[in-house]
């Protein structure tokens, strides 16, 4: 029987680290199409769609027995959606919005499996609530100077130096980091990939 390829449709080092923890062989083929953050009015549907788009793009580029894992994270606060900041100034504005407030982190997981010509799709969104402390301008400036905000939805990472700003987390910690890890494990376990 043809070997099952496992493909991560993301270049996120945090998602890569989660897969490495499972002790499985996998490859990385990042989805390259830009994310359209305006496609849906419902943020949960938008998050689900973005994860599915990433997985589907890479699935369509590959062949044979394979498992393609797509994921997307976004931050939602005061009616605004935040992906990764495009500049330091955008990062500053995001952090000011988060300061002293609760916000939601939405992380989608889409796993597309093709095995001997049969296709299965698993798709889920985790919603986590996070509370930031009140940030001063000097706190924000010092943090931005570290460069840690780059490549992170909402300009922060719960697993990085910015964790010092987080007062409370309600939900799946791994999903805030960038991948609903337990959900992925359940799927891979059900498929006989991991024990």
Image: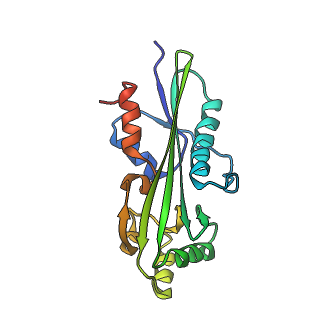
Q: How is the image coloured?
A: rainbow
Question: Residue 77: image x %, image y %?
Answer: 55, 68
Residue farthest along the front direction in this orientation: 42
Residue at the image position 37 percent from the left and 35 percent from the top: 186
Question: Relative to 188, does residue 79 appear above or below in the rendering?
Answer: below
Question: Relative to 26, does residue 120 appear above or below in the rendering?
Answer: above
Query: For the N terminus, which image quadrant?
Result: top left
Residue farthest along the left direction in this orientation: 195
Query: For the C terminus, which image quadrant?
Result: top left
| Relative side of 33 to 131, left or right | right
Instruction: Tally the numbered discs.
Output: 0
| Relative side of 52 to 146, left or right | right
Instruction: Look at the image and tell me whether residue 191 can be seen.
Output: yes
Question: Residue 122: image x %, image y %?
Answer: 50, 34
Question: Relative to 27, does residue 108 appear above or below in the rendering?
Answer: below
| Relative side of 87 to 67, left or right | right
Viewer-side residue, 63 vs 158: 158
Residue at the image position 48 percent from the left and 15 percent from the top: 2
Residue at the image position 69 percent from the left and 53 percent from the top: 36
Question: Residue 141: image x %, image y %?
Answer: 51, 82
Viewer-side residue, 146 vs 102: 102
Residue farthest along the top direction in this orientation: 1
Question: Residue 89: image x %, image y %?
Answer: 62, 77
Instruction: Look at the image and tell me whether residue 150 can be seen.
Output: no
């Amino acid at each position: 029987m043809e070997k099952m390829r496992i493909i991560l449709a993301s270049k996120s080092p945090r998602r890569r680290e989660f897969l490495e923890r499972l002790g499985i062989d996998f490859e990385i083929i990042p989805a390259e199409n830009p994310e359209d953050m305006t496609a849906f009015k419902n943020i949960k549907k938008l998050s689900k769609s973005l994860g599915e788009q990433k997985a589907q793009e890479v699935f369509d580029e590959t062949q044979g027995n394979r498992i393609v894992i797509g994921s997307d994270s976004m931050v939602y606060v005061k009616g605004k959606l935040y992906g990764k900041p495009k500049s330091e100034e955008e990062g500053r504005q995001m952090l000011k919005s988060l300061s002293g407030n609760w916000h939601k982190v939405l992380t989608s997981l889409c796993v597309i499996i093709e095995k001997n010509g049969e296709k299965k799709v698993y798709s889920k969104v985790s919603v986590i609530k996070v509370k930031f402390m009140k940030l001063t301008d000097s706190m924000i400036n010092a943090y931005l100077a570290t460069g840690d905000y780059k490549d992170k939805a909402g300009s922060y990472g719960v697993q990085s130096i910015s964790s010092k700003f987080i007062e409370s987390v309600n939900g799946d910690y791994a999903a805030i980091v960038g991948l609903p890890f337990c959900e992925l494990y359940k799927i891979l376990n059900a498929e006989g990939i991991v024990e």
